Image: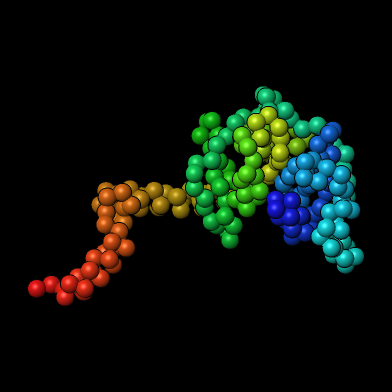
Amino acid sequence: MSLKKMLNSCKKQKKLFVERHGSQHFLDNGHMKFDISDIAPAWSAEDCIIALELTKDDLEKMEYGDVDASNFLSPDDPRLIEVHTIGISICFANMEVCPFLTPDKKVFFVNTEELDLFKKVHGLKFKLNTEPNEKHREYGLYVFSDSYCVGMIKPIFVYLERLNKCLGILKEGVARSLYTHFLDAGGQVSLDDISNSDADDEADGGDD
């Protein structure tokens, strides 16, 4: 299923490269790399094209091919720092993104749809490439299964000033709601409870 989603993403992005790093090889859509070493170990770009049933007209609008590349960074490389999601997603510009937090409390964002390809990965860890001159810097976020790299993703660039203003409004609003317990899931009666209560009153004949 993940391979099919990645292939469709390549078709959508109009970029399809099978990139080899030693014994590993990745499917690359120009914005992320996804490890297909175990799923389709013998596949080339031509095999991907056949699987997608792309026509000559389709291929004229795409970039595609096979690429031999140098090995990427190992999980213990000092240029990589471990980062974590903060448990929420945000939708803006018709795209759902997931915020990540660095050890020094900086925030960056990654496309949630791309992250979903790794949902079933065992021992999932994320590390950010901090070396500005590194060859694969543009892919930024490395995705590891324990010590094995299963993919790389480019972070999303956003208008930080606008986002900061919106989050400031949200923070103030949440603080006010918390103070008054406005629609709080913790202790307040829910709308469902109110509806059920009204239904019970009607069944009992209402108020005396």
Residue drawn at (28%, 61%), measured in percent from left and top?
193
- Residue 111, image x, y percentages: 62, 50
Q: Nearer the viewer, residue 106 or 91?
A: 91
Question: Total of numbered circles in the picture?
Answer: 0
Q: Which quadrant, please, contains the C terminus? A: bottom left
Q: Nearer the viewer, residue 129 or 202?
A: 202
Q: Nearer the viewer, residue 20 or 170?
A: 20
Taking the image as drawn, is residue 148 in sight?
yes
Residue drawn at (46%, 53%), measured in percent from left and top?
166
Q: Nearer the viewer, residue 117 or 155?
A: 117
Q: Residue furthest front?
A: 204
Q: How was this image coloured?
A: rainbow
Residue drawn at (62%, 44%), measured in percent from left and top?
120
Taking the image as drawn, is residue 63 in sight?
no
- Residue 57, image x, y percentages: 88, 67
Q: Is residue 71 left or right of residue 160?
A: right
- Residue 130, image x, y percentages: 66, 32
Q: Quadrant of residue 197?
A: bottom left
- Residue 93, image x, y percentages: 58, 59
Q: Quadrant of residue 96?
A: bottom right
Q: Is residue 49 left or right of residue 164?
A: right
Residue drawn at (42%, 49%), measured in percent from left and top?
168
Q: Is residue 203 left or right of residue 45?
A: left
Q: Residue furthest left?
A: 208
